[in-house]
Image (cartoon, helix red, strand yellow):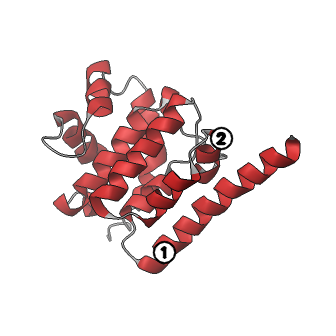
Amino acid sequence: MTNPEPRTPPAHVPHLAALLKSAGISNGERAALKRMALDGPAPLALHRLLLAHVDDAWQGERWLADWRAVVCALAIQRDGGFNPATPFGRALAEARFAESRLERLLAASGDTLRALALRAARQVAAKGIACDWRTFAELLFTRDSENRERINTRIARDFYRTLQSAIREE
């Protein structure tokens, strides 16, 4: 019997979002995940969540900082905040995310990318917009420059389509 292919990090997002809005995680753990910083000691709730719900292939130390950003972003959303019908770029536009901030986000990498992505997630959460956080996870976990450019393009196109649509409606 062979093991199935591990899911990609974005494929974990719907389950993690549903778990974070359910009674499957305590209010104390959810609060710890919301307050979690991108550096320093991670709350035990993060380790417990990752161990129980993330495939082994993505458990390594190499991925921990990206998981911190993804889990924190999901934890701060109202009612899970996951809606696959609303692209991440569209949510940024609807949250009135500044173009200059989008440009910095899409050009960033490493710790800077994680910090800027989490700021974007906080702005989306503050506006109460649910979106497809799988693209957010792709942005963080992608290491290949060609794939990263495709993700950046998708986010930017969804952002500008939403802005253009809003202008036409005025």
Residue of label 2: 94
Residue at horizontal 40 percent and vertical 77 percent from the top: 144
**Residue type for callout 1:** Asn
Q: Quadrant of residue 49?
A: top left
Taking the image as shown, residue 45 lies to the left or right of residue 119, namely left
Residue of label 1: 147
Label 2: which secondary element: helix
Whole-angstrom CA distance, mark 1 to mark 2, is 25 Å
Question: Residue 146, position in %: x, y?
Answer: 48, 80
Question: Residue 41, position in %: x, y?
Answer: 12, 41
Q: Is residue 32 above or below residue 55?
A: above
Outermost residue, right direction?
169
Residue at horizontal 26 percent and vertical 20 percent from the top: 28
Outermost residue, bottom direction?
146
Label 1: which secondary element: helix
Quadrant in which the C terminus appears: top right
Q: Can I make out residue 84 in this image? A: no
| Mark number, residue 97 | none
Residue at horizontal 28 percent and vertical 46 percent from the top: 68
